Amino acid sequence: MTAHPGSVPDLSGLTLAEQASLSGGADFWTTKAVGEVPSLVLTDGPHGVRRQAGATDHLGLAESLPATCFPPAVGLAQSWDPELVGRVGAALGTEAGALGVDVLLGPGINIKRDPRGGRNFEYYSEDPFLTGVLGGAWVTGLQSTGVGASLKHFAANNAEHDRMRSSSDVDPRTLREIYLRAFQRVVRTSAPWTVMCSYNRINGVYASEDHWLLTTVLREEWGFDGVVVSDWGAVRDRSASVPAGLDLEMPGDGGASDARLLAAVESGDCSPEDVRTAASRVAALAAKAAGAGRGGAARDAGTLAVGAEDVEAHHALAREVAARCVVLLRNEGGLLPLNPGGSVAVIGGFAQDPRYQGGGSSHVAPTRLDVPLEEIRALAGSGTVTFSHGYTEEGDGAGLREQAVRDAESADAAVVFLGLAEHQESEGFDREHIELPSEQLDLLAAVARAQPRTVVVLSHGGVLRLAPVAELAPAILDGALLGQAGGGAIADVLFGRVNPSGRLAETVPVRLQDTPAYLNFPGENSAVLYGEGLYVGYRWYDARETDVAFPFGHGLSYTTFAYSDLRLEQAATGVTASLTVTNTGDRAGREVVQFYVSKPDSAVSRAPRELKGFTGVTLDPGASERVSVLLSREDLAYWDVRVDGWVVEGGEYTVSVGASSRDLRAEAVVAVEGDELRLPVTLDSTLGEVLADPKAASVLAEVLAPSAAMGDSSALGMDMARMMASIPLGRLTAFGPVGREELEALIARINQEG
């Protein structure tokens, strides 16, 4: 008898073998139908639905059905627009439903620790706050349609090198504040149906076998109640993974893993209750999908397709989104926007054969593809547009370069498309450098000499060294990867139909050697030390006062904005920051207002400033609007390793507001009440720590007069008070003022009265 859609199937009638089979895949993309529990279809995202056509193959590499290819996360993050990201999620959910998909594998929210990371195109940012806000919006949008998300890759998956064995060795505070914080936000605010554990080890323990990660943190601390699914092939030992908190191993292997799990139960290495728990969670997920109208429904690939109406509407959305994601890095002399009636020399192969998505498991078969050259011609009006390739990766490109120079000389402006091809960056390997190909830089140098009005358009999944580009080109548009409608979006921005408002979601360094993880990436001997600690991305560059090519949050507009009247108000939930933004230019435009928080006198190591809020505002010329954000108390907290918990440090905080992490226009100070933090006194507590607490100091003073014990140290040329302050209480017995038993009694009294 089939369970009612949406109800959790009764597993009591299933054998242990049947329950075990529920937590193992049927094939590459589906789970098993067992008893009343229907099968599920999980397939790759995050920027489009990669639904494999026909029968699934053992590697999941067969042709996939057409779907809208939205900007990958590297581009989408540059929108700094949660509402727009949510609309993308909803559109993806609509298409996933039409293609018979129950769970779309995304979003990827790992932190971009190093610009060489091979999968950086699939992740949002170097900053956990921005990542968490955008990732949460994507999940909420997707799941509003009844399709589940799979938050990935949990956790500390920041490199592709040796990714199935390498251990990410990271200290507790850094792990919590940088690499887990976005996951925590999305789990708590958006409740993803599933979380995908990563391939790598974390401090020596495989993520799929990490009970602390999957159960203690994810479920018990954060309240996650969904399914933990493995990354495809991430499970080394299922009998160790299921007790740790893994619910579903993917892909299926014909039942061999199920049999090994049962054998582990028989040998006592795995509990039957753990197997039942995993099965019940998978069954609950299947019921949730069935309640949304899928989960066990007919999935003949021959009958599945995105509707024609959605194809058109979603392509239009993809163009709108892509234009929002374009970052105007440079615009000397107001070169952009271009005059539609002028002549333009378009140069570079990416103008004709665009790079619009990343390589690997997230590769989407687009429903259509906008070609930048064609879109530029469509918007050029009465102007003329010429095209030349300009360079080649094979052989001598002198002839191509000479033709490009001739075209540029005879035009009013040149638009040069530069970037990285798919084979130069992809899932599965990390880049060795961040340089543009030399033949592209040679081309740009030649064109810029011939045509001062040269615009560069960039396409890439990972950060590039842009110092040589900025030296040559007065205008630069950074498209990152813009999806199938990127060609139209670029044309819209070039000709001013869209005023650019994108912002960088990661810092562009002057050189690779300046990057935080330069000496510790990608690791060696299957381990990578996170030696930079908390200082990832702009935190690192700001702390070291290092020059950057373009800072985190940077992005220009065809208009200008002014900030005024910053006000801060403390509330129980945090600090409300508000200010007035005015469009001081002659075009309507959108400004992304960024709020950074610092605590210069902090007792713990902190970055000079951290992003804790942002908002967008669209204004007509001359118009003003007051904007406000809540800088939540939770986001002001740091992870205190002494109490293994979040702590808000009391005192004065500086809130800086601006258009990037280094373009700060206003600041104000606010007093924040701190959390009460009382650490128990032990024999290892120092004299200075105890004396800093008036109550504890008064108890200690009854038997110990610190000034007398310290004596006159002037003859020794030393500060005895400072030296004594660092001595643990347990060591005081060596200096004679108090015995061990008396000291222990004092400590007990201090803790009791404290």
Image (cartoon, helix red, strand yellow):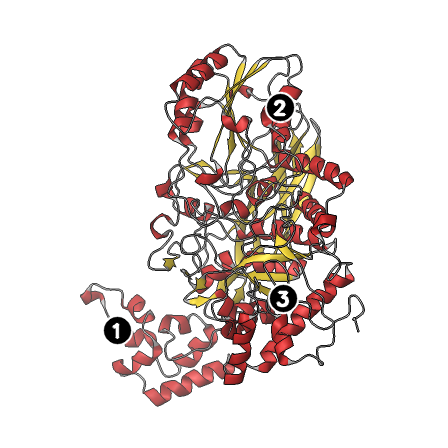
Q: Residue at x 18, y 66 (%)?
A: 715
The answer to whether residue 377 is seen in the rendering is yes
Q: Percent from the top left, x then y, of residue 532? A: 39, 54
* 569 and 101: which is toward the camera: 101
Would you call the spot at circle 2 few (<14 residues within 10 Å), some (14-19), or many (20 or more)?
A: some
Q: Percent from the top left, x then y, of residue 424? A: 44, 39
| Distance from the alpha carbon under mark 2 to that under mark 1 | 85 Å
Q: Which residue is mark 3?
A: 227
Locate residue 544: give its quadrant. top left
User: Which amino acid does the dot numbered 3 rest on?
Assistant: Val
Q: Residue at x 39, y 42 (%)?
A: 545
Q: Secondary structure at mark 1?
A: loop
User: Which amino acid does the dot numbered 2 rest on?
Assistant: Glu
* 336 and 434: which is toward the camera: 434
Depicted 188 relative to depicted 742: above or below: above
* 363 and 458: which is toward the camera: 363
